Image (cartoon, helix red, strand yellow):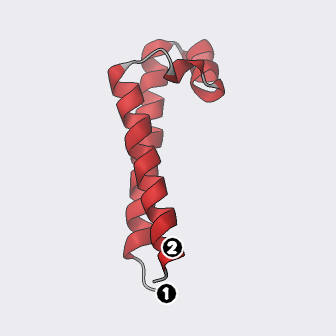
Amino acid sequence: MQIREWLVAGVAALFGLLVIWAAASDHSFAFRLWLPRLLEKKFGRNQARVLLGLLGLSLIVLGIYLASREV
């Protein structure tokens, strides 16, 4: 596995952690971005937080998958 693939996997996992942290802590700065604002407008604040948490979890799973696969 090349360093580029490790970097992509690490960035995906890091962004996943960031999204989960923003959803769990309910920071208002995170809900000023376009996707959380759209989700909040469509589903409400609590459901938007759950969906963001799921998005973060999927990014972490993607990062783990990319880091564990053999090329």
Query: Mark 1–mark 2 contact, CB under 8 Å?
Result: yes
* Residue 38 x/y as whole percent: 64, 21
Question: Residue flagged by tag 1: what amino acid is it?
Answer: Val
Q: Provide the residue designation for mark 2.
A: 5
- From the viewer's side, name the closer residue of 55 and 21: 21
Q: Provide the residue designation for mark 1.
A: 71
Say above or below: 12 vs 43. below
- Secondary structure state at the residue bearing disc 2: helix
Extreme residue in the bottom direction: 71
Extreme residue in the front direction: 3
Marks 1 and 2, the one that precedes in the sequence? 2
- From the viewer's side, name the closer residue of 62 and 17: 17
Q: On the picture, is 45 further left or further right than 35?
A: left
Q: On the picture, is 20 further left or further right than 11?
A: left
Note whether residue 58 is visible. no
* Residue 16 x/y as whole percent: 43, 45
Say above or below: 52 vs 57. above
Residues at marks 1 and 2, CA–CA distance in whole angstroms: 10 Å
Note whether residue 25 is visible. yes
Q: How many marks?
A: 2
Residue for point 39% across, 18% down: 26
Question: Residue flagged by tag 2: what amino acid is it?
Answer: Glu
Sort mark 1 into few (<14), some (14-19) or many (20+) by Cα contacts within 10 Å.
few
Residue for point 45% across, 71% down: 6
Say above or below: 68 vs 60. below
- From the viewer's side, name the closer residue of 18 and 49: 18
Sort mark 2 into few (<14), some (14-19) or many (20+) by Cα contacts within 10 Å.
some
- Secondary structure state at the residue bearing disc 1: loop
Residue for point 45% across, 83% down: 1
Residue for point 43% across, 24% down: 49
Q: Which mark is residue 18?
A: none
Q: Quadrant of residue 19?
A: top left
